[in-house]
């Protein structure tokens, strides 16, 4: 079997490529096709552990779920996880191979193309349809040489592509036509259609715009696809979606400092759905709200650097005052490490070797190490005994007296730590709040109201079905499928 494939590129970042591909994965799967998502190169600190023991971008894991398949590393062979302003951790087929500065990566990225094409071939060999997502903007001609994420990959696989524009941000006609105007003519030849996304209001008002785009490009203009108002119920991959994780309906504040290198922030999504939670993302320069009942320190891609950033905002002072006043604190992964007494990086995993003084709210110490632990876990809360389903994705070992009072138990072994009062806790388990029973018990012990009927995972799946139905209504999926073709290696 060799699948047909179709690529989706964007006029810019956050135009909805990931959601369109996720919705199409579910829609075509519902039609009986074996569908696979694929993204050649992704840049995100929101990642997921795969069934084959690696990691990929969160969006591809969601798309795999939409296709009712287990996520595997072939779906996102190159993942870049920013560690600093000018450099990233490079993940190849689910495993960290190096940390590179931007200039070094751009000079070397074309060498990863054979690995990318091999992963793509693995998916096409056992699928009916592969839906490929590009990265960022397809019109960044300054980055075209050596590209493996957009037209560089499309040319290598001889793939047709649909160009997506976001009408919500304005200027969509100029963005689409401008892309055609600046990219190489050979790249333009791969474009098979355009698509207008995130429309608000009466779609007929854009009829003239669609006609103009179609006439100028000579290609069908699909949509417009109206804004999908349940999109916030699906995990966001891009940091641009983080602020939409806030909620206003609850009475009790759960505060989350927005770290510079915040990672896996979809951990927060189930909390947002609970009626008693008012989730507040604390922006740089703002204090942690004094009325907060719980402060969560989230994961980080550069723990020591984000610890320094946290202290520069004065959040360390706020957090210690919060705990002294009887408040609760939870650290997840990098946040857990920050709550301890020290974080040591003797091998320079995250930057210059050295040791950082932690917040001292847990009597533990962390030593970073090159080996990254990537595991899907079945655990139990050490307090209630309720089941947890989460995953480990971290580099480092944490030890100390407070680990004798663990946060959870994994295969009977202690995991994480609690201080003597039990009000400060830390864990390496990501995704823990998706466990409905644990989440309700955890919040109720803090006096926070919960929805006894909320099944978070079932709601995500129902939202994917609703997204698929949304696209069935507003796109001609038969015409879109007809654009796909079998890839041809060059």
Image (cartoon, rainbow, N blue to C red):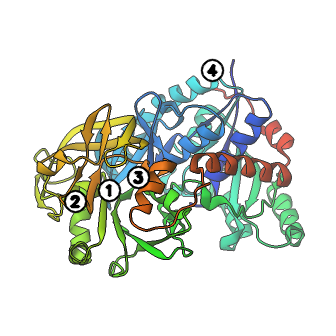
Relative to 382, say whether 156 is above or below. above
Closer to us: mark 3 or mark 4? 3
> Contact, CB < 8 Å: mark 1 with mark 2?
yes
Instruction: Name the residue beneath numbered marker 3.
Output: 45
Instruction: Name the residue beneath numbered marker 1.
Output: 300
Q: Is residue 147 left or right of residue 330?
A: right
Instruction: Point out residue 30 in the picture as x, y percentages from the top left corner.
Output: 77, 36
Quadrant the N terminus occupies: top right
Q: CA distance from mark 3 to mark 1?
A: 8 Å
Instruction: Point out residue 362 in the picture as x, y percentages from the top left corner.
Output: 17, 58
Q: Residue at x 31, y 60 (%)?
A: 330
Q: Residue at x 79, y 53 (%)?
A: 470
| Mark 4 Cα-neighbour bin, 10 Å: few <14, some 14–19, many ≥20 | few
Query: Residue 99 shows which numbered tag?
Result: none
Relative to 129, say whether 272 is above or below. below
Instruction: Point out residue 113 in the picture as x, y percentages from the top left corner.
Output: 47, 34
Instruction: Name the residue beneath numbered marker 4.
Output: 125
Q: Closer to the N terminus: mark 1 or mark 2?
A: 1
Query: Residue 338 shows which numbered tag?
Result: 2
């Amino acid at each position: 079997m060799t699948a047909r494939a179709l690529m989706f590129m964007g006029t810019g970042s956050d135009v909805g490529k990931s959601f369109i591909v996720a919705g199409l994965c579910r829609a075509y799967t519902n039609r009986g096709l074996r569908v696979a998502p694929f993204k050649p190169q992704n840049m995100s600190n929101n990642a997921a552990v795969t069934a084959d023991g690696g990691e990929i971008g969160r969006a591809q894991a969601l798309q795999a779920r939409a296709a009712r398949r287990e996520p595997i590393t072939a779906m996102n062979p190159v993942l870049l996880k920013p560690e600093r302003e000018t450099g990233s951790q490079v993940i190849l087929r689910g495993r960290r191979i190096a940390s590179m500065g931007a200039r070094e990566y751009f000079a070397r990225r074309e060498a990863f193309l054979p690995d990318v094409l091999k992963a793509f071939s693995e998916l096409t060999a056992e699928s009916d349809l592969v839906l490929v997502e590009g990265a960022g903007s397809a019109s960044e001609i300054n980055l075209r040489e050596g590209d493996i994420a957009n037209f560089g990959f499309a040319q290598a696989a001889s793939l047709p592509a649909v160009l997506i524009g976001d009408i919500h941000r304005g200027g969509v006609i100029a963005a689409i036509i401008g892309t055609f105007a600046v990219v190489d003519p050979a790249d333009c030849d791969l474009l098979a259609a355009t698509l207008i996304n995130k429309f608000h209001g009466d779609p007929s008002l854009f009829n003239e715009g669609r006609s103009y785009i179609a006439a100028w490009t000579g290609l069908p203009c699909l949509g417009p696809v109206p804004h999908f108002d349940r999109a916030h119920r699906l995990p966001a991959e891009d940091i641009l979606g983080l602020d939409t994780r806030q909620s206003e309906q609850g009475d009790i504040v759960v505060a989350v400092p927005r770290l510079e290198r915040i990672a896996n922030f979809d951990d927060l999504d189930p909390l947002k759905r609970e009626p008693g939670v008012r989730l507040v993302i604390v922006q740089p320069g703002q204090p942690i709200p004094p009325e907060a009942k719980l402060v969560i320190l989230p994961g980080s891609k550069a723990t020591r650097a984000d610890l320094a950033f946290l202290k520069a905002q004065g959040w360390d002072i706020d957090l210690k005052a919060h705990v002294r006043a009887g408040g609760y604190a939870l650290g997840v992964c990098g946040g857990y490490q920050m709550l301890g007494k020290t974080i040591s990086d003797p091998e320079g995993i995250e930057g210059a070797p050295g040791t950082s003084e932690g917040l001292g709210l847990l009597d533990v110490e962390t030593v970073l190490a090159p080996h990254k632990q990537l595991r899907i876990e079945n655990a139990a809360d050490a307090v209630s005994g309720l089941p947890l389903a989460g995953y480990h994705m971290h580099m480092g070992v944490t030890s100390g007296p407070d680990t004798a009072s663990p946060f959870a138990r994994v295969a009977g072994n202690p995991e994480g730590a609690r201080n003597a009062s039990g009000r400060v806790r830390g864990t390496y388990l990501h995704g823990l709040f998706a466990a409905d029973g644990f989440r309700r018990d955890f919040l109720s012990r803090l006096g926070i109201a919960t929805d006894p009927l909320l099944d978070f995972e079932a709601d995500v799946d129902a939202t994917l079905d609703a997204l698929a139905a949304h696209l069935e209504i507003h796109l001609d999926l038969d015409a879109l499928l007809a654009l796909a073709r079998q890839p041809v290696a060059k």
